[in-house]
Amino acid sequence: MSRWDPHQSSLRQLQYLVAVAELGGFRRAAQACGVAQPSLSAQVAQLERTLGVQVFERHARGIRITAAGEVVLARARQVLVAATDLDDTARRQGDPLAGTLRIGVIPTVCPYLLPEVAPALHTALPNLTVVWSEDKTQALIRQIEEARIDAAIVAVDARVNSLETMTIGEDAFVLAAAPGHRLVKPAAPASPSALDGVTVFLLEDGHCFRDQALALCGATGAHAAGLSATGLSTLVQMVGTGSGVTLLPQLAVAVENRRGQLAVRRFKRPAPSRTLVLAWRRGSALQRPLAAIGAVLQQAWPLFDRGVPTVRSTTSNAR
Amino acid sequence: MSRWDPHQSSLRQLQYLVAVAELGGFRRAAQACGVAQPSLSAQVAQLERTLGVQVFERHARGIRITAAGEVVLARARQVLVAATDLDDTARRQGDPLAGTLRIGVIPTVCPYLLPEVAPALHTALPNLTVVWSEDKTQALIRQIEEARIDAAIVAVDARVNSLETMTIGEDAFVLAAAPGHRLVKPAAPASPSALDGVTVFLLEDGHCFRDQALALCGATGAHAAGLSATGLSTLVQMVGTGSGVTLLPQLAVAVENRRGQLAVRRFKRPAPSRTLVLAWRRGSALQRPLAAIGAVLQQAWPLFDRGVPTVRSTTSNAR
DNA sequence: TCGAAGTGATAGTCTGTGGCTATGTCACGA
DNA sequence: TCGTGACATAGCCACAGACTATCACTTCGA
């Protein structure tokens, strides 16, 4: 019965392998792994020998990953993710609501949500330490899949099958422009068709909020301005001085318009909006603490949502 | 950047852990792993220490798995399965259609399908060695999930989410009884309602074919006989001598009725049937060779299917 | 009641794996 | 042409993990 024929390779060897692939070289990988380059080289070479696959082509000017190596690397990463889950599982055995979680947040949410929510989380889950990071959706998803972060707060349109999600809340879009602009003068909620033919300033590529705003523009006949902003603050400055119009998530209005330089007008219900979710890798060992965090976020959400039903077309939402 | 903090534990330690759990003791596990008991004990103890979880309670009369241990073990198995996938991936890099595959087959299929199909497989895929095993559906699924076999030929009703499947063919059910029995005398195909009030002999519990036949009985008003058979051969003997009726898969008729001791009658179309599939673990590294095997099985299937459209209500289907 | 047979743990020894430093070889670019 | 940075090689050392022998304990049966 060959059931117990041992796995020759070790987890450490797999880590070395993946490190070389990701950092693009043995020296850098060795440094990152905290070992000397010859030690790492030897381990990788031995792993290649036991697997019977050459993963890297060694050149004097660095390495190349072979075709066979790519598929082997993908499997190696899977093993390491599973091992990480094992570690997590074990670590949480005592108190599932204790320990450290790494959560990524998209840039159009992070600075507005965290200041309110981080203290609430600490109160609700005092033994849990959350390390926040900020990145765009695609990067966050990759980081989740590679177990480099434990979860992310994102605004999903398309469901990613490798992730599980929990809805935090709906974040409505609002119109924003310099006070006096014709689009934001009326007190009544705007119809989406008000955007027809209008030039709208958007975020630069890679922000999911750009895509969502762009979709709304496409549906309403608006078109994107030639210039893109690197963040919502920039966006606000651009339309605040000029004559343009932009879309903002309600979540950001209180902070971005704290000096009242903009006039803001909401849409008729059902207002266009994005759904914020907490997402984590399917099968993660951290279901328990993540679900607890998700619950806290859900509870806290009305704090940010307050503008939506009763927003005034004036500046300076309460703060 | 804690990205590269190493996994302390090794795959070998995980194997030891799982072996202890499955074999129920350190000595047996050590023997199975081919190491001395103290070596294995030390490794398991260290693993428990690094994970911070006591997986086993040690008693003089063996071990018990702790509650925390159960969940840790499940994760450990996942890591080993991923490692097996890595090995498989690497091994198949040269020729994906070479090497060895372990395939399980349910008892109501194995003896009838293999004699025909094994040579065909060898012809079509000469570099592939298939090791066949026979077990019931539930056991096979567990073996697939634990990477103890690579695939199985089963008759699924409920789809199991952890498995991917490829249909081999439809295997119709037929009525079988001693020649002269009123149910098998007419030449015309039977209506399912013919079973109403009839006592039908079935396989013993655990055979999926029992459940499928039982479902048909329930739908038609038949009821199960008190006595169950351990296999189709036994079933044939039971009804061949007595006055009972049974259901057989068409696949088995040629072999089981080779001496013509039974009269067989098919059902009106659409005849009740089971779907035979080749199933493997989702994400298995063996997609390529398994799909190739599935294709050969599909092609070969009409060989066994021949009775269905034109079956006579006589004995002795061609062979 | 006591010993045999089973469990896993402990003690002490040895070897091979995987680490280190120092150096070699090669390709490219200044 | 030589310097620089890539990865490989050589040689050494230490400790992890294997082994054998034995202990401590429980259970079962004579």
Image (spheres, coloured by chain):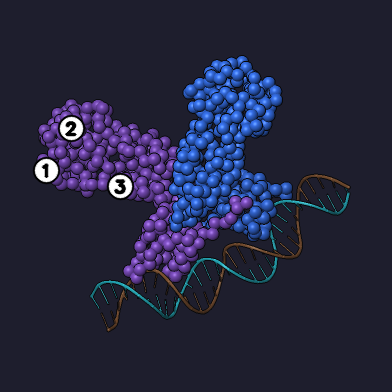
Chain colours: A purple, B blue, C cyan, D brown
Q: Name the residue under label 2.
A: A220
Question: Which circle's residue, 3 or 1, is located before the other in the chain?
Answer: 3
Q: Which amino acid does label 2 sit on?
A: Thr
Disc 3 from disc 1: Cα separation: 27 Å
Marks 2/3 same chain: yes
Callout 3: chain: A
Q: Mark 1 points at which residue?
A: A242
Residue D17 to residue B107: above or below: below
Q: Name the residue under label 3.
A: A136
Q: Element type at marker 2?
A: helix
Q: Position of residue B277 (x, y in %)?
A: 50, 37
Q: Which of B246 and B210 is in front in this view?
A: B246
Q: What residue type is labelled 3?
A: Lys
Q: Element type at marker 1?
A: loop
Residue A67 to residue B303: above or below: below
* Residue at (67, 55) in percent of width and height: B31
Q: From where the camera sits, is residue B145 visible?
A: no
Q: In which quarter of the image is the N terminus of chain B?
A: bottom left
